[in-house]
Image: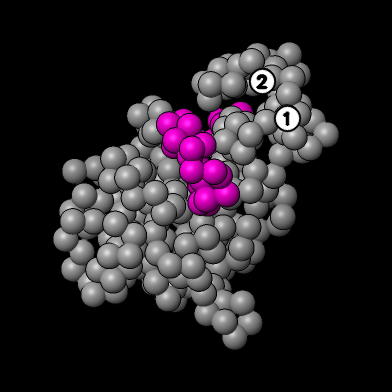
Amino acid sequence: MTTSTPMVKADRVCKSFGALKVLRGVTLEIERGQVLCLVGPSGSGKSTFLRCINHLEQVSAGRLYVDGELVGYSERGGRLYELHPRQAARQRRDIGMVFQHFNLFPHRTALENIIEAPTQVKKVRKQDALVRARDLLDQVGLAEKADAYPAQLSGGQQQRVAIARALAMDPKLMLFDEPTSALDPELVGEVLGVMKNLAKEGMTMVVVTHEMGFAREVADQLAFMDGGVVVEAGEPRELLAHPKHERTQLFLSKLL
């Protein structure tokens, strides 16, 4: 039984946009080196929860911790005080995020996209950043595309560059927001392959996905969200084969 601090701990996390309650008390823990897959219908709060983990969205209530540290706030005397944007950005440096749309700089090559954050944010020497970037491109199977611009790459290749770009910051946690949903079906496998290798290497990952095969094969934990809450969570194979909750059964029956 592990006694180490969870990499992610969500304690009754709520998030509202005006009158719209998107998260209604999400409680989850992800241990170091684990992969959590979040599944559920559109509008269930999966992506919002992911964005709260790296403080792209502020939580409205509850607490979120990454590696034992409260995200986006400091706590004094039981009250929360929002961190200065610079402090919040420092926390965010340790959390890699890969979006549905690749968000690469169109006017920069694959290599230039990858070295941007390490050289600008972490002040890594350009020469060192280039060596690391080439290594990462090799890891994601794109060593020969270093000098290609995003427009010259397929969607799957762009997404693999985006993963390499996130890894260039040496994150302790990787967040994936439906990383394959904008891809043609035949390109999905190449991105999932990179993610499987990351999982094997022990990267802690939270993945919002509809790829149930990936969830079954790679995830340590599967959580089904609906209406801003975790309806059911558990070991992926068990949950996919024997969902207990009627809402989970209905959702999975349409997918599997």
93 over 236 or under it: above or below: above
| Residue that extends furthest to the right in the rendered view of this protein | 107
Specify the quadrant of the image occupied by residue 96: top right
Quadrant of the rendering where the N terminus is positioned: top left
Q: Position of residue 36 (x, y in %)?
A: 36, 49
Return the mark for residue 145: 2
Number of other residues with Cα within 10 Å of mark 2, as a class: few under 14, some 14 to 19, many 20 or more: some
User: In the picture, which quadrant includes the C terminus?
Assistant: bottom left
**Considering depth in this image, is 57 or 103 the residue closer to the camera?**
103
Q: What residue do we see at 43% from left, 43% from top?
A: 205
- The residue beneath circle 1 is 152
Q: Residue at x 18, y 56 (%)?
A: 241
Is residue 205 visible in the rendered image? The answer is: yes
In terms of secondary structure, where does tag 1 sit?
Answer: helix
In reply to whether residue 250 is colored magenta, the answer given is no
Which class describes the residues within 10 Å of circle 1: few (<14), some (14-19), or many (20+)?
Answer: few
Residue 112 sits in which quadrant?
top right
Residue under the image location 42 percent in, 76 percent down: 227
Residue appearing at x 63%, y 48% in the figure: 101
* Mark toward the viewer: 1 or 2: 1
Where are the magenta residues, as a range?
166-195
Name the spot of residue 222 as percent of width and height, x first.
31, 54
